[in-house]
Amino acid sequence: MTKFEALGLDQPLLDAISDLGFESPSEVQEKSIPILLGQETDLVALAQTGTGKTAAFGFPMIQKIDVDSRTTQGLILSPTRELCLQITNELKLYSKYLKGLNVVSIYGGASITEQARQIKRGAQIVVATPGRMKDMIGRGMVDISKIDYCVLDEADEMLNMGFFEDIKDILSNTPQEKFTWLFSATMPKEVATIAKKFMHKPVEITVGTVNAGASTVQHEYYVVGGRDRYAALKRLADANPGIFSVVFCRTKRDTQRVAEKLIEDGYNAGALHGDLSQNQRDLVMNSFRKKQVQMLVATDVAARGIDVDDVTHVINYQLPDEIETYTHRSGRTGRAGKSGISMVIVSRSEIRKIKSIESKIKQEFIQKQIPDGIEICEIQLYHLANKIKDTKVNQEIESYLPAINDVLDGIDREELIKKIFSVEFTQFYNYYSKTKDLNTSESGKDRGESKGGEKGEIPSEGSVRYFINVGERDGYDWMSLKDFLRDTLNVEKEDIFNVDTKDSFSFFNSDAHLAEFILQTFTEFKLEGRFINVEISTKPGSGGGGKGGKKRSGRKGGGRKGGNSSFKGGIKGGGRGGNKGGFGKKGGKKRSGFY
């Protein structure tokens, strides 16, 4: 018996699960599905975004629906058009072996008459945004007076978006004897009010801690002067080539401004906010899902419903006013069991807010330093080296080699390498080599700073920064590398911190008293026949780019436009980004960039 079979699901659903490649249910699925299949009850489920909630309510609803009846029996309310469409698509995949089941989505920005026509043909399950659902009820285009099941998905987000009255009106048009399943990441008082008013003795389940952040997300903050916020954002992107991120701003105006500046500076960026038309939103989101946009700058309201599993970083360009909103922001990364990083750019006056968030999400923030210009140059240079090494040779170049060799005649190998790398490095170096330190006086006080002396010397106090020659291409992220180090050294998880994984190597910190033990452990240490080398880093900070290390900082991948992505034709105004993966066709504006 498979783990999904043990939950009580019928064979058609199990067949669909097999096709989808699901192997084990997530915690929220394991807790919810048996209750919803085995009992006729209301349910309140608190679980973070990205934990598999759609399947948790989708499988039981599909199994309970009478496909022979054309009556609308299930209603699912979700906060945004994107999430509405996503839920609809997932339910269709789950029910692919159930003939006669019809799932219809209704949302704003599309023809209301066409949506009404689809429902009239017979929709056993309707997935809707609150605004459009209320409109259609008012026009008599949909009948939800006989539904058996109602799901409020991302309930806290819907209420944060101002749908409280709409939801109350919609629920008042549903039968009293229906069963309501409420799924939410947090439990603000408005959600509790809805539960109390429209639900009867609901079963309550919690995955993780209420309002807590996901354990797969590392939380970091960077202290800078107010005028340096945008420069800090660019450096964090440059120090993490291959970044695929959502950047949060407070207002629509800031969102548009930051996105435009990023694009002008050569990043693959896009804006997502309420002033965009539905068509513009669709274009931006499609580009983001295809990773053509790698830095999506968004307001909190516009970003709700974004469900992309591979987001590597969430960057809080500005902190939100509500702590619950931070939980939603950070939940955009570290999804589906993957690790992620949530970065916060703050001024000194905002540091106290970090402490408030820590107590709410039950997780500690790591204070880090904005990487300096030389470190970023190292990162980009060694990323370029890795990229060249991994490039697949195009055999069509063979016929051009004699002429190329003639041009390069007389240049030895070492000189040729210098010239190749200088094509990219010189412009980048010229831009970054004289830039100032963006860190405020507060930002060097975290435990990531060691009090060591000369190169290779073991500090006697504080913490120590190490270089290790394994990274992402070896299958490690910050979470799995931390586990590897903890298990190898047989120390507590808290003894290893500030882990930064890069392309082919990484950095981590420990307290100084462990330094000698760590270095001894990794002397002549082999893993699967390969020597694993650990050294004390020559740059002992804890910055977003890993704070240097033995001149080989080639980390995670290439700048803003993203490590291996192709930008939309060239560099649009320069930027270090590069163009369609090549070495800077159009040259850069002040700097060119490698990835």
Image: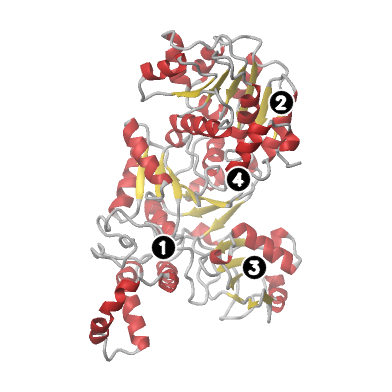
Q: Which mark is residue 558?
A: 1
Comparing 324 with 388, the one in front is 388
Sequence-wise, the earlier of marks 1 and 4 is 4
| SS label for mark 4 | loop
The residue mark sitting in front, 3 or 2, is 2
Q: Is residue 362 above or below residue 72?
A: below
Which residue is denoted by mark 2 in the rendering?
A: 37
How crowded pointer 3 is (Cα within 10 Å; few <14, some 14-19, many 20+) is rated as some
Between tags 2 and 1, which lies in front? 2
How packed is label 2: few (under 14 Cα within 10 Å), some, or many (20 or more)? some
Q: Residues within 10 Å of mark 1 (few under 14, many from 20)?
A: many
Quarter of the image where one finds residue 432: bottom left
Q: Quadrant of residue 408?
A: bottom left
Residue beneath label 3, please? 462
Q: Amino acid at mark 1?
A: Gly
Q: Could you tell me how far apart the alpha carbons at marks 3 and 2 are, in whole angstroms?
A: 55 Å
> Which residue type does callout 4 highlight?
Gly
Quarter of the rendering containing residue 184: top right
Mark 3 to mark 1: distance in Å? 32 Å
Instruction: Find disc 4 in the rendering and name its residue.
Output: 21
- Of residues 314 and 183, the one drawn nearer to the viewer in this rendering: 183
Could you tell which of marks 3 and 1 lies nearer the N-terminus? 3
Q: Residue furthest bottom?
A: 410
Tell whether label 2 touches label 4 (CB within 8 Å): no
